[in-house]
Amino acid sequence: MLTNLTPQPADKILQLMQKFREDPRTDKIDLGVGIYKDASGNTPVMRAIKEAEKRLWEVETTKKYTALAGDPAYGDAMVDLVLGDAVPRDRVAAAATPGGTGAIRQGVELIKMANPDATIWLSNPTWPNHPSIIKYVGMKMAEYRYFDDATRGVDFDGMMADLAGVKAGDVVLLHGCCHNPTGANLNMAQWAEVVDSLQKTGAVPFIDIAYQGFGDGLEDDAAAVRLVASSLPETIIAASCSKNFGIYRERTGILMTVSQEAGNKPLAQSTLAFLNRQNFSFPPDHGARLVTMILQDKVLRDDWMEELENVRLGMLALRTQLAGELQRLSGSDRFGFLAQHRGMFSRLGATPEQVERLRAEHGIYMIGDSRMNIAGLNEATIPVLAKAIIDTGI
Ligand code: PLP
Ligand code: TYF
């Protein structure tokens, strides 16, 4: 039986990670996989996580099962973090999942249960795991225009034209903030137009928010998801704690649904629990518990927010420095978009051949579509990257 298996497509981002590891050059620069790194290239455990782990070791008396949807306190804390008071709590169902990816997978399965004929609309481009999971689950998908190659901003007219053609009951997958892989984002006036469009077509928004706190701040980064959830009858949200709590390997995420009325919530809640049971039974608890402890304790929460804010400001400073250096070297403003983009990533707009030359000639690793992880830079490597970009004729 096992001989019947056929090779499956590899993840290009993870493949590049391996290639970087194998490169013997000591001055190589890793702008590949989306993991936050400090100026020394380390991904430290955040202070509040360390402290919560210490406390947890002292107070935790059992590791017995929690509940199929995870600890309800985690659900409450995350609904607060993501949605604030944008929608009444009695319309929101939530279940802990293994990472944001687990939430996306369960979200797609939920959509399949509710409307197997729905088409799921994805931004072009999007995070490659979106189409991969949707295809695997067996749902139809389509793309809406998103990135403008000329400005390296959002092709908003193209996006709106495509969203106007979405059918009632279809699903539109939107990045809540810090678009991966482009770094180009909608402003709030544009989000309001997206809301109008969804209202007109009757499409259901599915928001993936994996970088809250990495763009314009914890509250500002949640503004779009809050606007959408408070304006439309139904919203599905997949949130990840991997980046903003730095707990990548703990697999901590959450799937939330906002039902039209409080009366519809119990069915959504029991379906989320059912989906967990079918896939893995009880969700991982360690990361979720740390997140809950931090969000519930003022001292830990303030410390986490301070550290996260420093991470965010550090990436913004790197953006400004890189854009400034490129302006100096090129004598033009054509790289100004790097300072406008938000989050961990920017799509540089180089050709695959240029990306390959950066790797081969300069030891600079970015994803083939020219996505750079800004956190992979530091003050010393910014001039090196800027010079390589100019030398490569980008
Ligand atoms: N969605 C996007 C757009 C991402 O970039 C990521 C990646 O880290 C995730 C979701 C989910 O990540 P995780 O499953 O590690 O929580
Ligand atoms: O886009 C990224 O780099 C992050 C990390 O299969 C990631 O989201 C990349 C690939 C993958 C899982 C996570």
Image: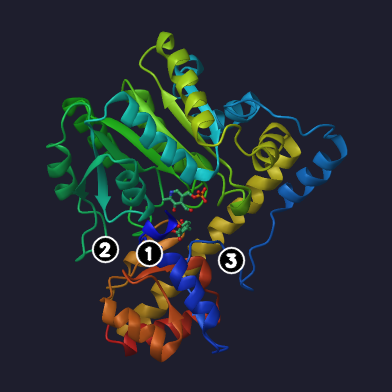
**Who comes first in sequence, dot 2 or dot 3?**
3
**Who comes first in sequence, dot 3 or dot 1?**
3
Q: What amino acid is at disc 2?
A: Arg
**Front residue of this view, candidates 309 and 7:** 7
Give the residue number, with chain letter if any, for mark 3.
37
**Front residue of this view, candidates 99 and 339:** 99
Give the residue number, with chain letter if any, for mark 1.
346
**Front residue of this view, candidates 144 and 314:** 144
Q: Which-is-in-front pick, marks 2 and 3?
A: 3
Left or right of 165? Residue 207 is: right
Question: How packed is label 2: few (under 14 Cα within 10 Å), some, or many (20 or more)?
Answer: many
Q: Secondary structure at mark 3?
A: loop
Q: Are marks 3 and 1 in contact (CB under 8 Å)?
A: no
Q: Are marks 1 and 2 in contact (CB under 8 Å)?
A: yes
**Front residue of this view, candidates 13 and 243:** 13
Q: What amino acid is at disc 1?
A: Ser
Question: Which residue of the protein is positioned furthest toward the front in this rendering?
Answer: 1
Q: What amino acid is at disc 3?
A: Lys
Give the residue number, with chain letter if any, for mark 2.
152
